[in-house]
Image (spheres, grey):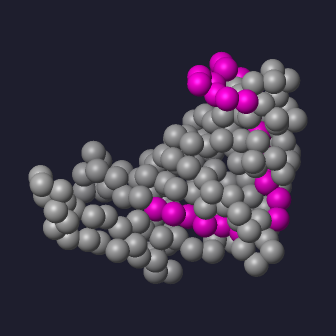
Amino acid sequence: MEESNMKFRCVDEFEQLSFDDSPIVSFQMSEDEVTFTFGGATIKAGNSQNGRFQDMYCGEITLTLLQAQMKRLVKEGMKYYDADGNLQREIPDEDVPEPAVESVVSRFEKGTVFTVVLGEIDGRKSAEFGIDVPQEEDEEEVDTYWFCVVFEKSEASWDRYCSPAEGADS
């Protein structure tokens, strides 16, 4: 792995970072590594690289998950209601089949992460990214995907802090 020349770098402090509403600038997935570059994120007060003791926004940030494997990719279903609130039809969640995975993840670069759920699967660390991706047919509409990865180690690096995070309760 190439050595990062970013100013700030933290290892295994995923829970001290927040990627809620972070636009994805680039995304790469190899056999054992997943790398997101986001347009920005929140560095939490408890992060070893944050000397400000409050949640801080940062500029572009790269998150790399090492010894990483995709566990699943799910397209979130939808419920359609009429004006009176009556359910008209429902589209269930669906697993993205293996042959389609590459074309879906190639669209992540236009997407935005709205949440990340950290957990554990079979004794390994896991991260489930909720990602809204503009539809190819209509950019105003989004498809929502849940991208779940297991990994051994996380690394994040960024160059600058922007401002204190508004409404952040640290």
Residue drawn 81% across and 47% down? Answer: 13
Report the residue that reaches farthest toward the left.
Answer: 83
- Where, quadrant-wise, is the C terminus in this rendering? top right
Majority secondary structure in the magenta region = strand
Q: Can the viewer see residue 83?
A: yes
State the residue in front, 100 or 71: 71
Q: Point out residue 163 in the picture as x, y percentages from the top left corner.
A: 65, 19
Q: Is residue 45 magenta?
A: no
Which residues make up the magenta segment?
145-170
Residue drawn 61% across and 34% down? Answer: 40
- Where, quadrant-wise, is the N terminus in this rendering? bottom right
Q: Is residue 84 left or right of residue 117?
A: left
Q: Is residue 164 magenta?
A: yes
Residue drawn 75% across and 48% down? Answer: 15
State the residue in front, 112 or 108: 112
Please determine whether, in this image, residue 100 is positioned above or below residue 60: below
Image quadrant in which you'd find residue 71: bottom right
Q: Can the viewer see residue 151?
A: no
Q: Point out residue 43 in the picture as x, y percentages from the top left corner.
A: 72, 34
Number of numbered discs: 0
Q: Is residue 129 left or right of residue 14?
A: left
Please determine whether, in this image, residue 33 is positioned above or below residue 141: below
Q: Point out residue 27 in the picture as x, y percentages from the top left corner.
A: 59, 53
Q: Point out residue 28 in the picture as x, y percentages from the top left corner.
A: 62, 58
Image quadrant in which you'd find residue 41: top right
Residue drawn 25% across and 51% down? Answer: 138
Q: Is residue 5 left or right of residue 28?
A: right
